Every structure is written in structure tokens, then in C-alpha cells.
């Protein structure tokens, strides 16, 4: 039993520190303490960029996945190679459903249509510093006619598309070929569920 289920918090103040493509907000909170009473007011700055969808594209007939590779500036300080391989993903825009985003991004980033789609789960990206969540989906595709490159010019996207056999993908995971959370989480889920993939579709 988690002790925290009965605890409360107060949001005393919200200040917008920056408002551009992304937002930075400073919140003032008080929380109930595990040992009783309330904390003193404290501040936390949160990076807010909305919420996102990622979809791992799988060609079940050919037993391979489709992933995209593109430059990620957030990887520059820590990675020797800031071109990362990931599932297709995108931000949920006003008026869009998560499935709409998955369908749109599959066409824009990977040049393919999703035939069947299923939600895996939703998770917090890094709740100590951002409010962003990712809804992870798995989508079935026919990878035969997928192009080698994709991306929208007006979004400065330069994307290389990879078709990776399942066993190769699992070997890449074991050999630390992926350094971004959404890829690791998605592939680990696939590895756990690969034997029963034919049963998971609605």
C-alpha cells in the first residue's frame, strides 16, 4: 500500500517565465508530509511543451519494424552521435486525438499508413522537470513501399527511414544502440510481447 495516496498538495502560485514554442513556468507548492503536517512553500520550474504520441511501426508479415533517424539537438551535449533512431512521434495539437497524431506522423515521418493501431500505455517523460507525457502506441504497417527518406521541409525535418528485422532490433537493444527513452521503452515492450503480437489487436 502506498502511503502517498492519502496525501494532498496545494498549488499556491503559477508564473510564466517564458512563453514561446515551449513554455517555462514556475510553480509554488506545499505538500502534506509523510510524517504529518505540511511543508513550507517551495518553488519548482517546469518545462512545458504539451503532450506527445509515439508509435512503434511493425510489419508483422515481414517481421520488421520501421524507425526514423534524425538530428536531435538535446543529444549534442552527451552523445557522440546526435542523430538518433526513434519511433515516429509528434506533439498533440489542439483538436487532435492521439490516434490522429499517430496516423499523421506515420505518413509525414515514415511515408506509410497505419493499418491497425493499439495503445500500449501512457507515461511521464521526466516529472521532476517537465509536465510532458507520451502516449505510446504500436501500429501495424506494410513496409514494402516505404521510402528511404522523409520529413517536412517547413519543419526543417531531414529523416532517414530504417526497416529493421525484429531479431536485429532486439540485438541492438542488448548492445545499447539506443540512448533515448521512448525507443528503449517501446522496444522493451515489444520484446516482452512479441510472442503474442497476433493476439493484442482489438
Image (tube, grey):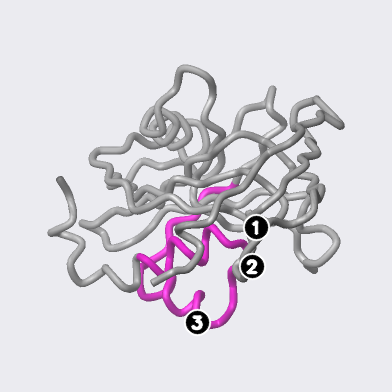
Secondary structure beneath dot 1 equals strand
**Marker disc for residue 130:** none
Where does residue 84 sit, x and y in percent of width and height?
A: 65, 57
What is the spatial separation of the Cα atoms under label 2 and label 1, in whole angstroms? 8 Å
Q: Which residue is mark 2?
A: 179
The residue drawn where x is 86% and y is 32% is 17
- Judge whether 91 appears above or below 34 on screen: above
Specify the farthest residue to the top.
95
Of residues 2 and 124, which is closer to you in this image? 2
Earlier along the polypeptide chain: callout 2 or callout 1?
1
Residue 187 on the magenta span: yes
- Judge whether 23 appears above or below 2 on screen: above
Residue 164 relative to residue 193: left or right? right
Residue 17 relative to residue 116: left or right? right
Magenta residue span: 160-189
The answer to whether the residue labelled 2 contacts the one labelled 1, judged by CB atoms less than 8 Å apart, is yes
The answer to whether the residue labelled 2 contacts the one labelled 3, judged by CB atoms less than 8 Å apart, is no
Amino acid at each position: 500500500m502506498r502511503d502517498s495516496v492519502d496525501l494532498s498538495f496545494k498549488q499556491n502560485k503559477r508564473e510564466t517565465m517564458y512563453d514561446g514554442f515551449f513554455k517555462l513556468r514556475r510553480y509554488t507548492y506545499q505538500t502534506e508530509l509523510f510524517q504529518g503536517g505540511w511543508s513550507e512553500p517551495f518553488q519548482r520550474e517546469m518545462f512545458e511543451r504539451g503532450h506527445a504520441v509515439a508509435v512503434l511501426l511493425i510489419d508483422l508479415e515481414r517481421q520488421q519494424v520501421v524507425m526514423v533517424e534524425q538530428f536531435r539537438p538535446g543529444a549534442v551535449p552527451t552523445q557522440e552521435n546526435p542523430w538518433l533512431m526513434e519511433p515516429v512521434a509528434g506533439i498533440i495539437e489542439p483538436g487532435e486525438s492521439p490516434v490522429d497524431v499517430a496516423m499523421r506522423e506515420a505518413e509525414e515521418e515514415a511515408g506509410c499508413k497505419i493499418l491497425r493501431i493499439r495503445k500500449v500505455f501512457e507515461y511521464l517523460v521526466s516529472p521532476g522537470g517537465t509536465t510532458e507525457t507520451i502516449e505510446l502506441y504500436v501500429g501495424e504497417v506494410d513496409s514494402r513501399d516505404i521510402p528511404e527518406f522523409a520529413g517536412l521541409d517547413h519543419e526543417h525535418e531531414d529523416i532517414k527511414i530504417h526497416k529493421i528485422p525484429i531479431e536485429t532490433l532486439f540485438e541492438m537493444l542488448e548492445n545499447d544502440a539506443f540512448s533515448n527513452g521512448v525507443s528503449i521503452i517501446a522496444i522493451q515492450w515489444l520484446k516482452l510481447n512479441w510472442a503474442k503480437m497476433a493476439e493484442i489487436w482489438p
